[in-house]
Image (cartoon, rainbow, N blue to C red):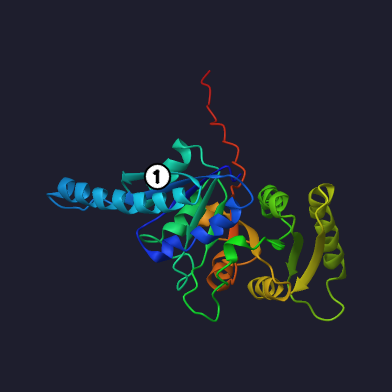
Amino acid sequence: MIERIVVPLDGSLTAEAVLPQVRRILHRNDSELLLVRAVVPAPAENAILIADAASQAAREYVHGVQTRLDREGVRVRSEVRVGSTIGVILDVVEDWKATMIAMATHGTTGLKRVLLGSVAEAVLRKSPVPVLVVRPFWSSDEAPSDDVERRPIRTLLVPVDGSDLSGMVVPAALEFSSLFDPRVLLLRVLEAKKKGEGARELEEAKSHLQGMAKPFERKGIDTLQIVERGDPVHQILETARFHEADLIAMTTHGRSGIGRLVTGSVTEQVLRRSPVPLLVVRAAAPARPKRRALVAKRR
């Protein structure tokens, strides 16, 4: 999953905020980085000249980042393409057979702004590969320490909602676990009930988490299964803080943007407030069988 990582850049420090997290992976795995910058053509009569100038500036910028990483011993390539940002990112993923995307959000509005427009939202909705998403921290009170790129991932939080789709994050979580050997927290959040209610639901949730834990335990990875009641976003963030999670791995349903996990737009809300990066896997719903056309035969 992390052999070839696409890193979209737009010339801002915000977009580059993902690089320390990427280096964190590189200390454990010799992944290849693919830096990509999209140049969106201007709707003007001289759009070609403007695009040429913008492409040259973009190439100089990306080459500078590539040179810096190359000096650190990173296997890195770069490419500048003219086109829509979302289209360029997804095309590069396909053309280079990338196995993961790593990108930053602007943080102030969740996934609504990154690079140009609501790019992160669209990428998470359409990406065929897992996406490592980082919220930049401009406040010293919440910023990670300077040595974040050398810190291992000790605790990985995996929230699930009991559906088959939410369990699709497990292979990606397993691969990260094989690199860092963290403790894996499997979290299921149930709807709040009155005292004495929901005993059967609680037992079902515990049984479900025990099943989710088996792939990790077969690889010798320590797991902790947690069932909480209440608001999913609150419980995910509180669990992450209490157990000092280094990464949260979640599934998002691609049908409606950041859409639905557990209840509501949970992935978007968690990222907006999360103190740690998210690893997001798009869970495509199974295709509906096509209806056969009924043809009336004339006798």
* Image height of 253 relative to 138, above or below: above
Q: Amino acid at mark 1?
A: Ser
Q: Residues within 10 Å of mark 1 (few under 14, many from 20)?
A: some
Residue 12: x and y in percent read 37, 63
Residue 195 visible? The answer is: yes
Residue drawn at the location 73% of the way across and 68% of the way down: 189
* Image height of 194 relative to 221, above or below: below
Looking at this view, is 278 or 234 the one in front? 278
Tally the marks: 1
Left or right: residue 84 versus residue 31 is left
Q: Which residue is mark 1?
A: 78
Residue 249: x and y in percent read 65, 59
Looking at this view, is 293 or 208 the one in front? 208
Looking at this view, is 67 or 164 the one in front? 67
Residue 258 visible? The answer is: no
Residue drawn at the location 69% of the way across and 74% of the way down: 235
Residue 214: x and y in percent read 83, 50
Left or right: residue 175 versus residue 202 is left
Q: Going by the picture, which residue comes out furthest to the front?
A: 71
Secondary structure type for disc 1: strand
Residue drawn at the location 76% of the way across and 63% of the way down: 185
Q: Quadrant of the N terminus?
A: top right
Residue 158: x and y in percent read 70, 60
Q: Going by the picture, which residue comes out furthest to the top?
A: 299
* Image height of 182 relative to 243, above or below: above
Looking at this view, is 209 or 72 the one in front? 72
Query: To which quarter of the image does residue 248 belong?
Result: bottom right
Residue drawn at the location 44% of the way across and 65% of the way down: 112
